[in-house]
Amino acid sequence: MDRSAWLEALGPMRHTPEPIRAMLASDGAVETLPDPQPQEWLAIHEERGQTCEEFVRTAARPPAGERTIYLQPVDEVAELSDACLSTLAGFVSAFFQLDVRVRPPLLLDPASLVSRAAPDTGTPQVYAGDILARLFADKPADAFCVLGITAHDLFPHPIVSFAFGEASAACRVGVVSVARYGPPFCEDAPGLHPGEMRKRCCRVIAHEIGHMAGIGHCIYLRCLMNGSSSLAESDRRPLHLCPIDLRKLQWLVGFDFAERYARLQQFWREADDAGEAAWVAGRLHDDGAQRHARPVRGGLFREWV
């Protein structure tokens, strides 16, 4: 997609401070999305995209009392220890700039869940909608959203083979599955570095929370919000938002760009991931970030107010 197309999706920035305009439109923040290959998401799904203006027209900023993200283990998730869940919570808090809490496991009665054998493997699956309904029923009053994390393999619709995650923007509940990150679905799982497993979890969790925030699939640039139809395609998604979706999230939450990048850089340093830390450092110290003497706070995108 050419530069004019994604700049149009980014929208006017007449009232945006010049350093932030430079940060959003800098070459370092933009990664071209290659043409889809057969069986990749955009090859089999027609999506029109979502501009910043379209997002602002339909999204609702959370009230002051509804700014906590809840991570909710659903049944036993042996793949994720308490320490791992705490690490994921740290990533989510830095990424979305909201408070994050991990809830005690939610144990579901198997008889209350619609299940089937997966069409591709014959292994058990659970209908994602049943889990979403239970999460919505137990949703705390101060929740920005609730994200279930389960080891159950999920299907979102009878004609769909599986889903890594499913979310409702209207109800702000979602669920992700780690089932296909290990055997029998994933052949590389036994030899997978723990850091790569963590990054897979970070990707799918942030992606589904993005949907709960009202952000649709990105078709413009390489972005965490790109759709995926396989684990390999999911692994190719970056762990950051393109400028278009970053602008949407900033409008919704109202964070300071520099503070957000600094927290993400610290997270990846502590996770011993030099590659991700270096990417964030590049955004933190690009020309736009260096030129503003004081942090630029949220609520500055007045084009659509």
Image (cartoon, rainbow, N blue to C red):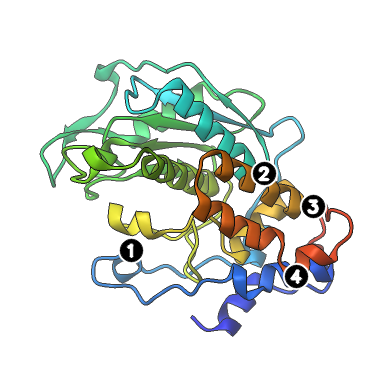
Q: Could you tell which of marks 4 and 1 lies nearer the N-terminus? A: 1
Q: Which element type, helix, strand or loop, lies under badge 3? A: loop
Q: Which mark is residue 15?
A: none
Residue at image x 37%, y 69%? 46
Relative horizontal placement of residue 14, taking residue 177 as reference (left or right): right
- Asked whether the viewer can see residue 192, the reply is yes
Q: Left or right: where does residue 169 sit relative to residue 25? A: left
At which x and y percent is residue 160? 24, 49
Q: Earlier in the sequence, mark 3 or mark 1?
A: 1
Q: From what the image shows, is residue 161 above or below residue 113? A: below
- The residue furthest left is 122
Q: Amino acid under label 4?
A: Asp
Where is residue 205 shown, x and y percent of the image?
47, 41
| Crowdedness near tag 3: few (<14), some (14–19) or many (≥20) residues, C-alpha within 10 Å | some
Q: How far separated are the C-alphas under marks 1 and 2?
A: 31 Å
C-alpha gap between disc 3 and disc 1? 33 Å
Question: Which circle's residue, 3 or 2, is located before the other in the chain?
Answer: 2
Amino acid residing under circle 2: Arg
Residue that badge 2 annotates: 263
Q: Which residue is mark 1?
A: 41
Circle 3: residue type? Gly
Q: Which residue is mark 3?
A: 298
Measured in 3D between alpha carbons, the distance from the residue under mark 4 to the one under mark 1, in whole angstroms, is 34 Å
For the point 55% across and 65% down, which residue is it? 50
- Residue 166, position as x, y percentages in the image: 40, 43
Disc 1 marks which amino acid? Answer: Trp
Circle 4: element type: helix
Quadrant location of the C terminus in the rendered image:
bottom right
Which mark sits nearer the N-terminus, 2 or 4?
Answer: 2
